Image (cartoon, rainbow, N blue to C red):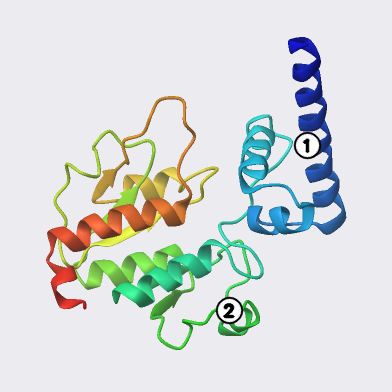
Amino acid sequence: MTTQVRGNRDLIKAMNRSLILNTLRREGHLSRTQLTEISGLSVGAVSQITNELLDSKWLLEVGEGDYTGGRRQMLLRLGACLGVTLHIIHPTGFPFSRKELKRGGLDYLDVAQFIEHDSYAHFDSHRRSSGRRLVLLTTKASQSAYAASYRDDDILMVGRESAGVPAEIADGADLRIRIPMLPERRSLNVAVAASLILGEALRQTGRFETLT
């Protein structure tokens, strides 16, 4: 009986894996959210299977946002609600413009504050001329994000979940931090990770006291 149950589970997982791969072949680039909606699978199933496909190199994660919502909108909404300006560094790897955001139905677009930079060099020049510190959130850091001291004008940077940021950008960061996690876990969703550390930075700098 146990063997039969296990066999059924393996078959279902293989069918779900095939469904995701066929959906991507048919539709092209999709976010996990879109895969969940199109395939009808649960969020947990899609996340587990896509992570396995990424690890086995069957899939390549090419961007941090999706075309109708996803992480870019989560981060913009986060900034809008907490009064934080986002810096968008091009090329982004996904469509980013007010037109695209409106098409995606972002209801916080009118109050979200963001600055676009043509390149990392432009962004780096901008933040250095303002005397602002670059704080990079990366799984490769040794310092816990909760052991760090934050400044009111820090800029928190997050990279791609699959690859982080290029080495030369990481080397130029003033502070590199990581979120403590259980061993053998890949990483958190970048929007979730940014929310955690932004919350800690706002708490330390007293910014929550200005919110209602």
Q: Residue at x 40, y 78 (%)?
A: 115
Residue 85 appears in the figure? no
Amino acid on which the number 1 mark rests in the picture = Arg
Residue 11 drawn above or below residue 132: above
153 with respect to 61 (left or right): left
Residue drawn at x 32%, y 53% as measured from the top left = 196
Report whether residue 148 is seen: yes
Quadrant location, the N terminus: top right
Give the CA separation, mark 2 to mark 1.
31 Å
Read off the residue under disc 2: 101
Which residue is located at x 13 percent, y 63 percent? 205
Q: From the image, tell me which residue sits under label 1.
A: 17
Does residue 154 appear left or right of residue 53 in this picture?
left
Q: Is residue 178 above or below residue 25?
A: above
- Asked whether 184 or 94 is in front, the reply is 184
Kind of element beneath mark 2: helix
